[in-house]
Each structure stands twice: as structure tokens, then as C-alpha cells.
């Protein structure tokens, strides 16, 4: 394959590749050439979980626990395309997202005739290391997803390898059911050609409190002759160890659901399954901490292709943040996260981790994987309903206003 780049871009890219060869693992500190910069902040990526609100709420309507677990698996697999290939599809290649500042928010909701309103709250809860927490909920159907994630990266033989730390938790209120979801590892392909894209690897799991376990394996092109973006999932009954369903295919195209071995369904999640757009407030009505408002000037500079202005506007935010951290240190305070709190552990999650671990070891005979220590994400992040209610009711109006001023100074 020939390089997608020509002229000066080609040499800029070559020196970029050279620079990442000695890359320290901190994705945020990596300086990428202008044409690979995205004006979207990483705090926005939480929205990828729910671009199909119907699939998100579908499990809540199902009476049978086994089928519910299957619907959760189906929904999870349907999010992969948005999460990992939407930038490549829309922008021609993977891009380097803006590095969110501490406290940065991305707020919005999806309006869907059938599913109703699904709310999105995403907040940058840690800057070093970068960690994003989110809460996505649909009150009508009692479906709640919350989670947090960070990345650990390394560079080897012309690829960037990324391991995700953190978890997602889905709750079905009506059935008092909880699902623990772990996050896939990925790597960036196509770097040499100047057109990077994501491929998933290794495995993730979904463990439900109702006694169902799913193992999801990812592979790419050339992996035992396989196709790109391949996925193969198995849904088991925890108690009997019986394999119930398999779902396999390409996470960017079509997946086939089989009941033990007979095909029961085929679902297309390409063009025939359009996404629901997220509704967010117009920039001028947004809180100063909201991502699009805070980064508006940086975004405009990227749009203009003005690299100097991009740098200047970015520095304004970064410097203001540095000063804030300095001030907090002097005063012995910390940044008050608006919607999330860090805890040492969550008992429900620990129980699911233990259950999954036992099943993997005892029944499948494999070593449990993907369970991380909270240290890597500055704590275990949970959605704080009290904080949320304080914000919504206006009880925290003064704090909210003051927090906003800290970024306003830099961006207005
Ligand atoms: C963030 C959490 C989302 C899923 C997701 C998708 C793509 C990942 C992103 C996460 C983290 C940042 C990421 C990105 C792909 C490329 C980008 C690894 C895990 C890096 C920082 C950009 C590398 C720069 C090249 C394009 C040159 O739920």
C-alpha cells in the first residue's frame, strides 16, 4: 500500500513516527501533526455507548433473563462500530482527540420515539492519568449505564498498542439486574501509510448478576486468515456451564446470532441501522465547563487549518488548568468533580468480578483477565446521585458558577 500523504505532510508524518518511537505511554502528551488533530475532545466519546437508544433499552422490556442477557450482549456489540471506527468512517482516518481538562463536561440527551429520552453525563474526573466517567440513563425504561475509563499505551513495531483500564456497569432497574462489562484492548494500524485506524484485540467479558457470562474475542485481518474487525462472542449459563448462544461476524458490518448452533437471527448494523443523533444545547447556553464551549476557539482554529492559532488557544486552556492545580495545591484543596465521586471499591462490582473469575477458571479453564486495580484510574468512579440532584435542583448554583469562571477567564 502506498502512503496516503504527499509533499510536506509526508515529511511531517515521518518525523512524527520517529518521535513516537520513543513514546512514553502518555497518549495526551504526544504531539501529532495538524492533519491528524481532531477538534473533538475525548470526553465526548462516552456518547458512543448509546447511539442506538432502542438497543440500549431493549433488555429492560424482555421477560426472560436468558434473553435479556443476550440483548445486553447484542447492544454491547452494536456499540463497537461507533466507538472504534466512526472517526475513520466519517473523517477518513482515526484522529487524535483533544485532551480533556479536569472537570470538562459533555452533556446531552437522545430523543427517540420508542425509547424516550436517554440522558448523557460525561465528566473528566482525572487529568493525570486522563480518566473519563459517564452516566447514561433512561428513566422511562429504568436502564442505567455508568462507567469510567482511561488508557495505557505503548509503541512497538509501528503500532500504538492501547489497553483500556476501567469498567462499565449496566443496570436494569425493573429486574434488579446488574451487568459488569470490561473494555477491549486495541491497536492503531496504518500508521506507516499516514492513515491510522483502530483494530480491536484480545477479549472482554460481560458478567450479569442474574448468572450469565459472556466472553467476547476480538481479532483482525490476517489473524488466522480472518477478516478485519472480527468478533466472536459466547454466552454461557454460570450455573450449568452450558453454552447458550454465540454471536459472530464483523463488528463494523453484520453479526450472526446462533442458539447453540442453529442460526436464530442476523442483524445488520451498517446503513440499515442509522444512529440517533445526540441533542446538546447550543454553545451559548452551555456551561463554561462543557466540552464544545470550552474548546470552541481551538475547534475553529483547527477548522481553519491554522496550526499556530490552534496552539495558542490550546495553551490558554492548558495554562489556566496548570494555574488552577497550582492554586489548589497551595490551598490544600482538590477540584470538586461535578457529577462523580471516587470510592475505594463497589461491593456489587467485586461480587461480579469474583463470579466471572470463578467461571473462567473453573468452567472454561482460562485465566481471568481484564480486571484492573483502581490505582490506574485514580480511584473507582461512581455516579453520585446526590451531586447530580444538587446540580439539577440549582442548590449548587453558586459552586457551578464559580467553577465556570475558572475556564471562562481562559476561553472568552
Ligand atoms: C476512548 C474510550 C472510548 C473508546 C475509544 C475509542 C478510540 C480510542 C479512544 C477510546 C482513546 C484514544 C485513542 C482512540 C483511538 C486513537 C486515540 C486511543 C479508547 C489515540 C490517542 C490517538 C493516537 C494518534 C494516532 C491517530 C496517530 O469509549
Image: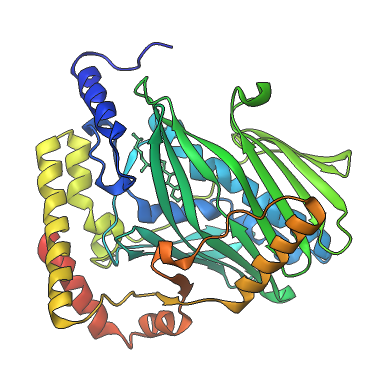
Which color scheme does this rendered protein use? rainbow
Lateral position of residue 259 relative to residue 361, left or right = right
Residue 272 in view in this figure? no
Which quadrant is the C terminus positioned in?
bottom left
Residue drawn where x is 59% and y is 24% of the image: 221
Task: Name the spot of residue 126 as percent of width and height, x first.
Answer: 33, 64
Task: Name the spot of residue 335 as percent of width and height, x first.
Answer: 26, 75
Q: Relative to residue 240, is residue 3 depicted above or below?
A: above
| Total number of numbered discs in the rendering | 0
Q: Quadrant of residue 289?
A: bottom left
Lateral position of residue 23 relative to residue 64, left or right = left
Which quadrant is the N terminus positioned in?
top left
Residue 294 in view in this figure? yes
Residue drawn where x is 12% and y is 51% of the image: 315
Task: Name the spot of residue 142 as percent of width and height, x first.
Answer: 63, 72
Residue drawn where x is 79% and y is 58% of the image: 362
Q: Relative to residue 225, is residue 250 depicted above or below?
A: below
Amino acid at each position: 500500500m502506498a502512503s496516503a500523504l504527499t509533499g510536506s505532510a509526508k515529511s511531517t508524518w515521518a518525523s512524527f513516527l520517529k518521535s513516537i518511537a520513543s513514546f512514553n505511554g502518555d497518549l495526551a502528551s504526544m504531539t501529532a501533526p495538524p492533519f491528524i488533530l481532531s477538534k473533538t475532545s475525548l470526553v465526548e466519546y462516552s456518547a458512543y455507548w448509546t447511539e442506538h437508544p432502542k438497543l440500549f433499552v431493549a433488555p429492560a422490556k424482555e421477560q426472560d433473563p436468558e434473553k435479556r442477557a443476550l440483548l445486553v450482549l447484542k447492544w454491547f456489540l452494536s456499540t463497537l462500530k461507533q466507538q472504534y471506527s466512526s472517526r475513520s468512517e466519517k473523517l477518513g482516518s482515526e484522529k487524535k482527540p483533544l485532551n480533556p481538562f479536569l472537570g470538562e463536561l459533555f452533556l446531552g440527551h437522545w430523543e427517540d420515539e420508542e425509547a424516550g429520552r436517554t440522558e448523557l453525563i460525561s465528566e473528566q474526573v482525572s487529568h493525570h492519568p486522563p480518566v473519563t466517567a459517564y452516566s447514561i440513563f433512561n428513566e422511562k425504561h429504568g436502564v442505567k449505564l455508568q462507567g469510567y475509563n482511561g488508557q495505557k499505551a505503548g509503541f512497538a513495531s509501528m503500532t500504538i498498542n492501547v489497553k483500556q483500564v476501567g469498567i462499565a456497569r449496566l443496570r436494569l432497574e425493573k429486574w434488579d439486574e446488574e451487568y459488569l462489562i470490561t473494555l477491549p484492548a486495541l491497536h492503531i494500524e496504518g500508521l506507516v501509510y499516514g492513515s491510522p485506524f483502530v483494530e480491536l484485540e484480545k477479549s472482554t467479558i460481560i458478567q450479569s448478576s442474574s448468572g450469565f457470562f459472556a466472553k467476547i474475542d476480538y481479532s483482525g485481518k490476517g489473524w488466522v486468515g480472518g477478516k478485519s474487525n472480527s468478533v466472536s462472542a459466547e454466552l454461557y449459563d454460570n450455573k450449568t456451564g452450558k453454552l447458550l448462544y454465540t454471536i459472530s461476524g464483523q463488528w463494523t458490518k453484520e453479526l450472526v446470532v446462533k442458539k447453540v448452533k442453529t442460526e436464530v437471527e442476523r442483524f445488520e448494523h451498517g446503513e440499515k441501522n442509522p444512529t440517533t443523533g445526540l441533542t446538546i444545547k447550543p454553545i451559548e447556553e452551555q456551561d463554561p465547563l462543557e466540552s464544545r464551549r470550552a474548546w470552541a476557539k481551538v475547534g475553529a482554529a483547527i477548522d481553519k487549518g491554522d496550526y499556530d492559532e490552534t496552539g495558542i488557544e490550546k495553551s490558554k486552556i492548558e495554562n489556566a488548568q496548570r494555574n488552577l492545580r497550582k492554586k489548589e495545591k497551595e490551598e490544600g484543596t482538590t477540584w470538586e468533580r461535578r457529577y462523580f465521586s471516587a470510592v475505594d471499591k463497589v461491593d456489587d462490582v467485586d461480587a461480579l468480578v469474583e463470579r466471572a473469575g470463578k467461571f473462567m477458571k473453573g468452567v472454561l479453564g482460562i485465566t481471568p483477565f481484564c480486571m484492573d486495580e483502581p490505582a490506574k484510574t485514580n480511584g473507582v468512579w461512581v455516579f453520585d446521585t446526590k451531586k447530580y440532584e444538587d446540580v439539577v435542583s440549582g442548590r449548587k448554583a453558586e459552586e457551578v458558577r464559580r467553577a465556570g469562571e475558572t475556564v471562562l477567564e481562559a476561553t472568552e
